[in-house]
Image (cartoon, rainbow, N blue to C red):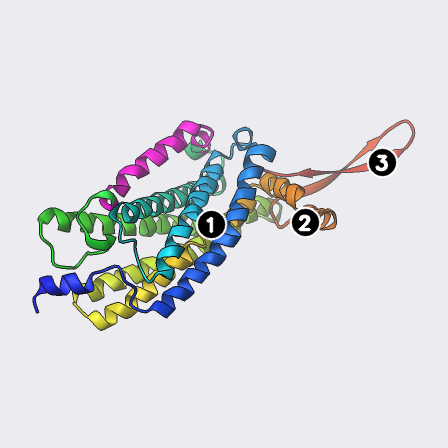
């Protein structure tokens, strides 16, 4: 049997194991059921309670938007997996979903890394001019980042690959090969390069934390919480699927079909796990901005729990007590002094 025949019978959209993909679909159902109300509530707080444009949190808001768009893609993925399809048989639907996933993943990673770099400059290069702090005050910069990400999705929109997943198969044109290769380069670059930057920022902040005196460590601990939360998001959502993708390409190029059927399931499972990004990012919002944390708790938590959570510092800020004197009595007023 020729390579062309193999390509037509093997490189299709059907799932190699229907039971496995039924499980994947129900995992995504859980992610959608939890992610939709969570992201809607976060979106509500950012717009109506926290007013992000006044609190210099435009980058955080962009992460919220990216997460919400990702959640919106999950019903289509759930439908395909429950019908034993890895991808839609419809070319427009397949390419649209990949376009959305590439765009939202890239935006989420880009803004998370910008936040980590901002914390890095605030801690390691304190006193120097922080260009990130200047940029994050401008909504135009966020628009530019989104526009910059659009060209990176072009490989997913070109009609040069079967079932949106054909790298390593027999190719008909050089454009086909270049497009597939470019798509893989974009996929890995969006994860590997930001992770290297993140590790560097984390190491420098940890090193700075060790050298600081006790009185200066509160702000550094909060910065450490920020970069640590981003590391957690990367370690759970992005790195595993990137590693699995590299293994999948290696197996496919060696034409090991039985091994490929297994690795495909691992890769798709880790991609499903990566959608937890929309559930984990709210942790980053809380660590990045204690004002948002307080606004969210005040809006959605019941009375007793609200008081407990608002009194808990979580290492995100400091609380001081100010005593004021009136003509009738002396009263103590506790005012939270929180760094945004």
Write down the residue under mark 1.
Answer: 278
Between 32 and 215, the residue placed more toward the observer is 32
Q: Which mark is residue 228?
A: none
Locate residue 299, reporting x and y percent. Answer: 65, 41
Write down the residue under mark 2.
Answer: 309
Classify mark 3: residues with Cα within 10 Å, few (<14), some (14-19) or many (20+): few
Answer with mark 1 or mark 3, whichever residue precedes in sequence: 1
Taking the image as shown, residue 233 lies to the left or right of residue 155, namely right
Instruction: Give the secondary structure at mark 3.
Output: strand
Residue in view at x 44 percent, y 57 percent: 28
Instruction: Give the secondary structure at mark 2.
Output: helix
Question: Which region shows up in magenta?
Answer: 133-156
Q: Main secondary structure of the magenta part?
A: helix
The question of residue 144 being in magenta is answered with yes
Q: In 3D space, how far apart are the residues under numbered discs 1 and 3 (Cα atoms)?
A: 44 Å
Front of the two marks 1 and 3: 1
Q: Is residue 139 visible?
A: yes
Write down the residue under mark 3.
Answer: 331
Residue in view at x 26 percent, y 47 percent: 186
Between 248 and 95, the residue placed more toward the observer is 95
Q: How many marks?
A: 3
Tell me, yes or no, whether the two marked residues, 1 and 3, touch with CB atoms within 8 Å: no
Classify mark 2: residues with Cα within 10 Å, few (<14), some (14-19) or many (20+): some
Taking the image as shown, residue 101 lies to the left or right of residue 176, namely right
Residue in view at x 55 percent, y 37 percent: 46
Residue extending furthest toward the bottom: 258
């Amino acid at each position: 049997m020729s390579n062309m025949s193999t390509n037509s019978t093997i490189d299709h959209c059907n799932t190699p194991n229907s039971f496995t993909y039924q499980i994947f679909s129900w995992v995504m159902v859980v992610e959608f059921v939890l992610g939709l109300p969570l992201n809607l509530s976060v979106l509500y707080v950012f717009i109506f309670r926290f007013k992000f444009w006044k609190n210099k949190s435009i980058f955080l808001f962009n992460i919220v938007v990216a997460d919400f768009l990702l959640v919106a893609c999950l019903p289509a993925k759930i439908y395909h997996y429950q019908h034993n399809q890895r991808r839609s048989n419809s070319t427009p639907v397949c390419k649209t979903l990949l376009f959305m996933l590439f765009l939202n993943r890239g935006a989420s990673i880009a803004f998370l890394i910008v936040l980590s770099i901002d914390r890095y400059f605030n801690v390691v290069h304190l006193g120097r001019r922080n260009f990130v702090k200047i940029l994050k005050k401008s909504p135009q910069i966020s628009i530019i980042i989104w526009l910059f990400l659009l060209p990176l999705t072009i490989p997913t929109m070109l009609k040069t690959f079967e079932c949106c997943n054909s790298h390593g198969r027999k190719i008909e044109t050089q454009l086909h090969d270049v497009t597939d290769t470019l798509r893989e380069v974009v996929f890995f670059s969006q994860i590997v390069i930001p992770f290297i930057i993140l590790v560097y920022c984390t190491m420098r902040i940890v090193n700075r934390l060790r050298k600081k005196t006790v009185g200066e460590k509160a702000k550094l601990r909060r910065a450490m919480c920020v970069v640590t939360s981003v590391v957690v998001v990367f370690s759970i959502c992005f790195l595993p699927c990137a590693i699995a993708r590299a293994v999948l390409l290696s197996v496919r190029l060696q034409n090991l079909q039985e091994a490929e059927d297994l690795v495909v399931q691992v890769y798709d499972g880790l991609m499903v796990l990566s959608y937890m990004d929309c559930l984990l990012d709210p942790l980053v919002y809380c660590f990045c901005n204690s004002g948002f944390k307080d606004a969210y708790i005040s809006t959605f938590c019941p009375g007793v729990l609200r008081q407990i959570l608002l009194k808990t510092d979580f290492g995100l800020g400091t609380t001081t007590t100010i005593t004021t004197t009136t003509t009738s009595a002396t009263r103590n007023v506790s005012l939270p002094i929180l760094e945004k």
